[in-house]
Image (spheres, rainbow, N blue to C red):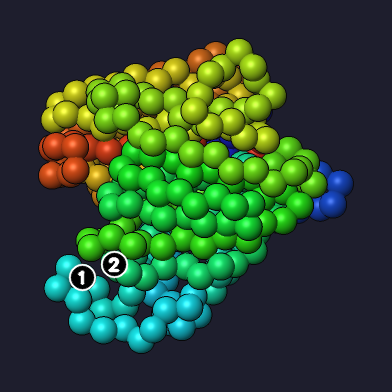
Amino acid sequence: PLCGETTCWSPRSLSASPQLCMRSTESPFVLLSLVHFGLAVLSVSGDSVCSTENILCSQDTMIKHIPAAALHVSEPNPAWFGNGPNKPDKSWSNGNWLKSRFHFSFAEYRNNKNDHFGVLRVMNDDLVQPKRGFGTHPHEDMEIMTYVVHGKLTHKDSMGNSRQVGRGGVQYMSAGTGVRHSEHNTGKGPLRFIQCWVVPDRRGYEPRYGQFNGKASSRKDQWAHLVSALSDPDVETPVKVHQDVNMYATELNQGVGLPYELQPRRQAYILCIEGEVRVVVNGREALLQRHDALEVYGAKDSPVLVEVIAEGVERTETGERAHLLMFEMQRDGSGGRKDL
């Protein structure tokens, strides 16, 4: 049987023997699972490699849980970003000035089986010590969105912008032909933010900066639609980017369930920022805790209901909450965790 247009599936019930994966320059990845009695399960998966144990398939809808333990943790030398030596700080329990969790290959972390998810190229979960930060550095041809979890992020750039944003806010920069900027925690307490890079729909855009100061009421027990495509004038969001991508955030009270309808041939990447949530997709479930993520691949011809339910909350700047960030985009068959 063939399960879906771009589905990777080896049903456990068939007791598949070891899989054979082949690539050629003329065709996409082909996954062939050899099973008893000469039967086989064949699926074509774009450029994906698929795991029987971690991908849950219902027709051509799939989910894959990315546990926090699977993320690369980076603690770079403070001098690399213009900071002085590490020193004791009453507000800071970590030994290093920065603790970053990389969802995809970045900096010293190189993993050709974990490079991106569709057009989402970078998602870094950064925790920064007070009075520290990232000195001036360049970017080009990337749509950069920074979502602040707690504390305040101070941004300065070569376009003359000098701004600060707090919890639930978004700083956006279209790097385009080139821009230089710095990011610092000038406050007295730790700063946590999620920095995400999206590949633009073409190169060479004029650089620009945008900012949205978050509203807690817009995220409470509902999806706040924060980012959408400039090419779609019918959708109004605080931030518009040069790519067919959407970003949402929500903060849930204990026990609250929130639906999202994932349209055909679309996919989503969900990050549990704070608390604990259960995600249900076509009857399949995954429990996400702080720092966990979930890949969700939509169906070929019909919408898929994605429901998130707050199973546990944390004390945050806005109360007892479970906190999620979600990117939604075209399902293009590329990327995703191939090593889980």
**In the image as oriented, which residue stretches furthest toward the bottom?**
85
Q: Is residue 299 left or right of residue 165?
A: right
Residue named by callout 1: 92
Q: Is residue 177 visible?
A: yes
User: Quick one: label 2, few (<14), some, or many (20+) residues within 10 Å?
Assistant: many
Residue appearing at x 14%, y 37% in the figure: 319
Which of the two labelled residues, at mark 1 and mark 2, occupies the earlier sequence position?
1
- Compared with 41, 126 (above or below) is below
Q: Quadrant of residue 205?
A: top right
- Give the residue type at disc 2: Pro
Residue 148: % across, % down = 36, 47
Residue appearing at x 33%, y 74% in the figure: 97
Q: Is residue 35 visible?
A: no
Q: CA distance from mark 1 to mark 2?
A: 8 Å
User: Quick one: label 1, few (<14), some, or many (20+) residues within 10 Å?
Assistant: some
- Compared with 1, 91 (above or below) is below
**Depth check, front residue: 96 or 190:** 190
**In the image as oriented, which residue stretches furthest toward the front?**
160
Residue 152: % across, % down = 33, 52
Q: Is residue 298 left or right of residue 305?
A: right
Residue named by callout 2: 130
Task: Report helix, strand or loop for mark 2.
Answer: loop
**Depth check, front residue: 186 or 99:** 186
Residue appearing at x 81%, y 52% in the figure: 24
Report if the CB atoms under discs 1 and 2 are less than 8 Å apart: yes
